[in-house]
Amino acid sequence: MEFSFALVWEILPQLLLATIVTVEATMVGFVLSLVFGAVLVTLMRTPSRPVRALARFVMEFFRATPLLAQLYFLFFVLPSAGIVLSPFVTGVIALGLHYGAYAAEAYRAGLESVPKGQWEAALSLNYTKLRTYLSVVLPQALPPVVPALGNIAIAMVKDTAILSAITVTELMFVANEIGSERFQYTEPVTAAAVIYLVLSLVATALIHLIDKRFRPEEAPA
Amino acid sequence: MQVVWDYRMLLLQGVWITIQVTVTATMLAIVLSLLAGLARQSNVWLLRTPATVYVELFRGTSLLAQLFWMFFVLPAFGVSMTPLLCGVLAIGLCNGAYGSEIVRGALRSVAREQREAAIALNFNRFQAFRIVVLPQAARIMTPLFGNLAIEVMKASSLVSLITLPDLTFQARNINLVHVVTAPVLIVVLLIYFAIALVISGGTRGVEHALAKGRDRLAA
Amino acid sequence: MTPIIKFEGVTKRFGQTVVLNNFDFIVAQGEKVVLIGPSGSGKSTLLRVLMTLERIDSGMVMVDGEALWFVRKGVDVEPVTESHLRHMRAKVGMVFQQFNLFPHMTALQNVASGPRYVMKKSKAEAEALAESLLRKVGLGDKLASYPARLSGGQQQRVAIARALALEPKVMLFDEVTSALDPELVGEVLDVMRALSSERALTMLIVTHQMGVARALADRVCFFEKGMMVEEGPPEQVIDDPVNPRTQSFLRAVKLT
Ligand SMILES: Nc1ncnc2c1ncn2[C@@H]1O[C@H](COP(=O)(O)OP(=O)(O)O)[C@@H](O)[C@H]1O
Ligand SMILES: [Mg+2]
């Protein structure tokens, strides 16, 4: 058994095109997860107990069940309910919901890391609740959240591969397809693995840069 | 709900495979976490470097890619495994790489002063590790290994993509081949959630046993 | 006088910071020496070198007639082996400012751990010894307590018992009462005072409390920037210091 670099070279354009889909799915999924996470964490801080409990359950439930099973749920049940979406859209919604639960947890930890004294200081200055969030709490809560969100993005890059199960033509799907067409899995699957490695290294470096900007002690004066 | 009852045998078979994969892959992941975590802390180059390569490689590539690689590519090199072995190995290896960070962090979090107290008592290195560092690190690691076990359980769903009829496989199959049904999918998700609850309950039990009479770790 | 500790031209640096500079120091067997001096002057480092928690850059340290850290091999100086360090550690015990008890062990297990694992005594024997030591420091009723359940003063007494259990020839105390609430200092001092009546035991005590120095010291050494500025009996160094730097340090200490 030999590894053919010629074959890798031949299929590379297809794989790179598929990589674009992977990157798109990651980016859209990530934005959705940030939004959904924010919604969840807001609901977890509402005065209504049942709403809080429900939001908390949703967060726990989405984190404790497999992305693939959630994906199948959306893929099979939405159309039968009359909602017809492309596999790509279904896939990024699943990513957004699954990782949104993780984002909510990250936000929650960030908000809880702001000392109670800060709330009391804002209160003593007669700030409104919104003003307190915007000027006092969020600026302190956000920097520690950045690395956690970064980890979500990195995990998501790799989990986009799971969207191949519902025929999203991302990297893993295309690699698999090439493999089954040619009865030759070694090169496409290995090349795909290397591309994932590169993607997550790039994502890691990017997040490192962003994280640095967000650190108060290193922010430009 | 009738439809769930109709497919109960398939679903139960699926649960059994999911549990098998989860339990064995979790054990493998924890063993690998400890080995790699310790090796990465070592000052022996020959231990540290392979461990680092292992961790970076398995954390950097997608688990599904690893799974497909073992399932499709390894046979081309003459290594053939059953889908079950393939799934357990890939999931165990990948999560062992993540888990090594847990071990590393826990070992580091045992204060330097504790190691110094062990030296002052003339413990040798192995004793210092076994008697002082490990019990304290174990307490920090336990809840994190519980989370790792839940991640493994979630990852076990990917074995459905290499033909293993686990819970997720059955969920897809029933919907694809038989009828499209929300109740089956909901029940499947609830079963996963229940397994996760059992795992976190068990983890808390272990934590409780490790805590014994002490209220907190001394500074 | 038999010297039990001997520093000869010892230099110790942390990066650019020279903590001990060509330092000489001798302690006689059974002597109780109190080291005083401003923060950052190198007192802890001196003790940590003796406990082998810090290695030195050059010079010789002798403990009980044997080299610590380096041995002379002909004209060369070579670092000692790990097994030699363990042999030397058996002669020295240390008590830390932050107690450093093992949080997952009871008071009894903390004290028994040395006899059990290092001296290889049986469990029963180690625990009997630990119990008698804990009684000696007034903690006979706290054998089964975990450190988290003990006050600072109690924890520090357990730590002293734990170090004593290995029967060291030299005991090092690094600001052992500094982390304690004032009302708990006395109980630890009482233990140390009782200990100081053991003639064979050499004690090296770092403290900021002049009362400790007066109560325990055969000799007080004022230490500054890694140098011995002044030394002598407590009456002289504390009450009638000659060196102006000692005088100003003591004035500052007495104010607090
Ligand atoms: N691990 C270390 N790394 C770098 N510098 C250190 C370290 N330990 C001590 N020092 C420095 O060595 C000097 C002496 O410290 P120390 O022996 O702790 O003084 P003291 O106990 O008299 O307050 C100080 O300047 C301190 O900052
Ligand atoms: Mg000090």
Image (tube, coloured by chain):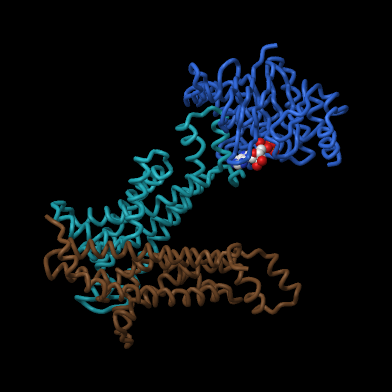
Q: Is residue B3 left or right of residue C218?
A: left
Q: Residue at x 42, y 40 (%)?
A: B42
Q: Is residue A16 left or right of residue A60?
A: left
Residue at the right extreme of this rendering: C240
What color does chain A have in the rendering? brown
Quarter of the rendering occupied by the C terminus of chain C = top right
- Residue B5's quadrant in the figure? bottom left
Q: State the blue chain.
A: C
Residue at the bottom extreme of this rendering: A82
Q: Residue at x 37, y 73 (%)?
A: A26
* Residue A107, position as x, y percentages in the image: 53, 69
Q: Nearer the viewer, residue B132 or A11?
A: A11
Q: Nearer the viewer, residue B113 or B29?
A: B113
Task: Note whether A33 is above or below C249 in the view shown.
Answer: below
- Residue B41's quadrant in the figure? top left
Q: Is residue B51 left or right of residue C52?
A: left
What color does chain B have in the rendering? cyan
Q: Nearer the viewer, residue A87 or C25?
A: C25
* Residue A218, position as x, y percentages in the image: 58, 63
* Residue A45, position as x, y percentages in the image: 58, 73
The answer to whether one can see residue B12 in this image is no
Q: Is residue B176 left or right of residue C37?
A: left
Total tally of numbered discs in the picture? 0
Quarter of the rendering occupied by the N terminus of chain C = top right
